[in-house]
Amino acid sequence: QVSLVESGGGSVQPGGSLRLSCAASGSIFSISLMGWYRQAPGNERELVASITNARITNYRDSVKGRFTISRDNAKKTVNLQMNGLKPEDTGVYYCNANGRTTTWRFFDVWGQGTQVTVSS
């Protein structure tokens, strides 16, 4: 079984910064893609940023130049550094990862979510 544990998040004023972290654990052989999604009240969950095991990154347009995703393959962690936060960045942020277990089963798992609130 594979699980993700998130940390970070909180409340900041517009223009502030936050750092989210996510650690994977369990019977993991490899992790292909790790990413961060967010969901605002009344909205669908949307991709914020993702990173492959080769560290190829992808960002939604609204966060480009402000957010940076990174991962440590040895530690099985993914981070999201968020700078220049805006009120529209408010939402619950979820970590996601997919890959293969040690028994070669495919997994696609989600973290429990962490709240990010940007408000003056």
Image (cartoon, helix red, strand yellow):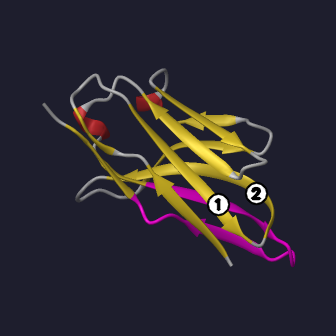
Q: Is residue 81 left or right of residue 93?
A: right
Report if residue 108 lies within the magenta region.
Answer: yes
Q: Secondary structure at mark 2?
A: strand
Disc number lying in front (2 or 1): 1
Return the x and y of residue 38 as percentages of the image width and height.
40, 51
Q: Is disc 2 in contact with disc 1, using a CB cutoff of under 8 Å? A: yes
Give the overall secondary structure of the magenta segment. strand
The quadrant in which the N terminus is found is bottom right
Return the x and y of residue 100 as percentages of the image width and height.
80, 68
Quarter of the image where one finds residue 86: top left
Quarter of the image where one finds residue 85: top left
Numbered-mark total:
2
Please report the residue visible at 57 percent of the width from the left and 64 percent of the height from the top: 4
Return the x and y of residue 94 as percentages of the image width and height.
46, 56
Q: Is residue 10 above or below residue 55?
A: below
Point out the stretch of residues depicted in magenta. 94-113
Type of the residue with mark 1: Ala
The quadrant in which the C terminus is found is top left
Residue topped by disc 1: 24
Residue topped by disc 2: 31
Report if residue 112 lies within the magenta region.
Answer: yes
